[in-house]
């Protein structure tokens, strides 16, 4: 993860902001260039996700959404 973030920082897409209480922690913030890049790539990303999801029926899409919500509620076990 650090290597990926280092690359994004080098490219000027994100900045690291030191944590207040724990110096080992930091927040990642998009720069203006990062936001512009995100705005550029997201339409294609959504198009591709839509293409993948198009194989599901409406009912399957609703089921998948419910399953993902249920799984998301348990992601706190990784914290």
Image (tube, helix red, strand yellow):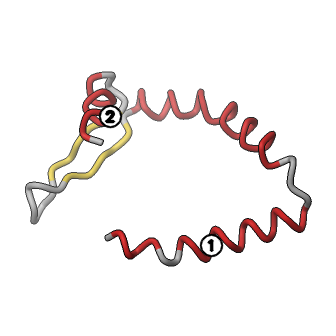
Residue at x 35% of width, y 69% of height: 78
Residue bearing mark 1: 69
Q: How far across and how far down the image is residue 74, in percent?
A: 48, 77
Residue 42 at x, y percent in the picture:
62, 36
- Nearer the observer, 43 or 45: 45
Q: From what the image shows, is residue 11 above or below residue 43?
A: above
In which quadrant of the rendered view does residue 70 lie? Answer: bottom right
Quick check: 10 above or below 15?
above
Q: Quadrant of the C terminus?
A: bottom left
**x, y percentage for residue 31?**
36, 34
* On screen, residue 23 above or below 72: above
**Residue in the picture at 32% in, 25% down:** 12
Along the horizontal axis of the image, is 22 left or right of 30? left
Report whether 53 appears left or right of 39. right
Q: Are marks 1 and 2 in contact (CB under 8 Å)?
A: no
Residue on which the image places disc 2: 4
Q: Secondary structure at mark 2?
A: helix
Binning the other alpha carbons within 10 Å of mark 2 as few (below 14), some (14 to 19) or many (20 upward) gives few
Dividing the image into 4 quarters, which one contains the N terminus? top left
Alpha carbons under labels 1 and 2: distance apart? 28 Å
């Amino acid at each position: 993860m650090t290597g990926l973030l280092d690359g994004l920082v080098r490219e000027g897409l994100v900045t690291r902001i030191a944590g207040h209480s724990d110096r080992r922690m930091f927040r990642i913030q998009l720069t203006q260039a990062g936001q512009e890049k995100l705005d550029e790539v997201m339409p294609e990303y959504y198009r591709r996700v839509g293409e993948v999801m198009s194989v599901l029926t409406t009912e399957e899409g609703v089921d998948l959404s419910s399953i993902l919500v249920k799984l998301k509620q348990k992601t706190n076990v990784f914290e």
